Amino acid sequence: MRKRYRLHLRGHEQLDRWLVSYADYMTLIFALFVVLYSVAMVDKDKFRVVIEGMTQAFEARPLQGEGLLEREGPAIVPPALAPDKIIPDPSQAQAIALAPISGVPMAQQGEPLPTLDAQLRKAMAPLLEAGLVDIQQDKEWLNIALDSALLFSSGSAFMGPNASPLLNSLSSILKPVDNYVRIRGYTDNQQIHNEIFSSNWALSAARAEAVLTTLIGQGIAPQRLAFEAYGEFSPFASNETEGGRAKNRQVVVAISRLRWVAPPAPAAQPVVAQVEQSAPQADAQAIRVIALPGGGIRITTRQD
């Protein structure tokens, strides 16, 4: 009787062991949901700050604040040198100077566009009030739109009497700085075809080139300049009215926020004395070709 009771208890113990595995399983499920909940409740602002700090550290860019998360403590990456203190590698100076605007490094910042904007508006205040000049600024360019009637006669690319004082005022502001400058020519859609210009495109190119040549003559480095021709294909207003066509006849002087860097002066080369060689004397044994009376030829080295 006692043996049967023991067997009964042993079987009961074996049947209850599943509770231990079930409890472990429930514990793991609970831990899993706690982790998922904590991941779902991430502070996005702090997470973004962490990612930004890691990106700056790997790319060696200066931090915007003093710390990483809460902007406390010393910066992980030391601040970079100011743009005006960056010394380019002499071996790369020529490549930087000749690079197009799209390839100029960010460190090559020119005179701030708001500063030039204020100077130009002060110098051209009467023309701005009369609507003959318009100045617009965006992130990349400061655009000075000049009415073609101020510079040229109708259908012509020869400078008129008003062009000289206007461009003198403009060059006095552009000459002290090193920003890139693009001169862009535009016309209306009235077709032109004469002995000088075969199309509006040619007219807009000639006008832009004339302005560029004048700026070079007033002392602006030609490496900073280029001209572009758009003809009738980039209108500012509708060509259906005379007012719209007049607005489309423009020369735009666009000033870039980036600057041109002059290449370094070449190093002085040592002067090597060269011995002047005398002219070679005629060879006494020069070959002569003599035509024979019968139609043949004779080759000889005799000079008699």
Image (cartoon, grey):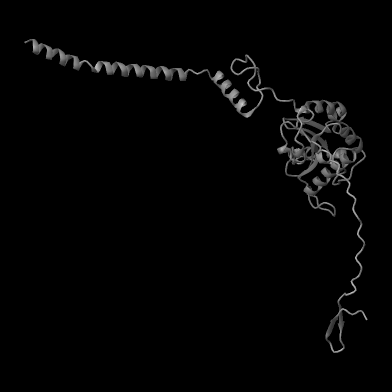
Which quadrant would residue 91 be assigned to in this image?
top right
- Total marks in image: 0
Classify 15 as above or below 162: above
The answer to whether residue 177 is left or right of residue 16 is: right
Which quadrant would residue 62 be assigned to in this image?
top right
Is residue 187 among the parts visible in the rendering?
no
Q: Residue furthest left?
A: 1
Q: Residue at x 71, y 38 (%)?
A: 103
Between 222 and 281, which is closer to the camera in this rendering?
Answer: 281
Image quadrant holding the C terminus, namely bottom right
The answer to whether residue 73 is left or right of residue 91 is: left
Between 296 and 271, which is closer to the camera in this rendering?
Answer: 271
Is residue 62 among the parts visible in the rendering?
yes
Q: Residue furthest top?
A: 2
- Where does the image place residue 222, in percent across and percent down from the top left? 84, 41
Q: Residue furthest bottom?
A: 294
- Where does the image place residue 291, in percent across and percent down from the top left? 86, 84
Between 219 and 301, which is closer to the camera in this rendering?
Answer: 301
- Where does the image place residue 147, in percent across and percent down from the top left? 83, 37
Between 104 and 191, which is closer to the camera in this rendering?
Answer: 104
Image quadrant holding the N terminus, namely top left
Classify 169 as above or below 280: above
The answer to whether residue 8 is left or right of residue 183 is: left
Which quadrant would residue 258 be assigned to in this image?
top right
Q: Residue at x 79, y 37 (%)?
A: 247
Q: Residue at x 15, y 12 (%)?
A: 9
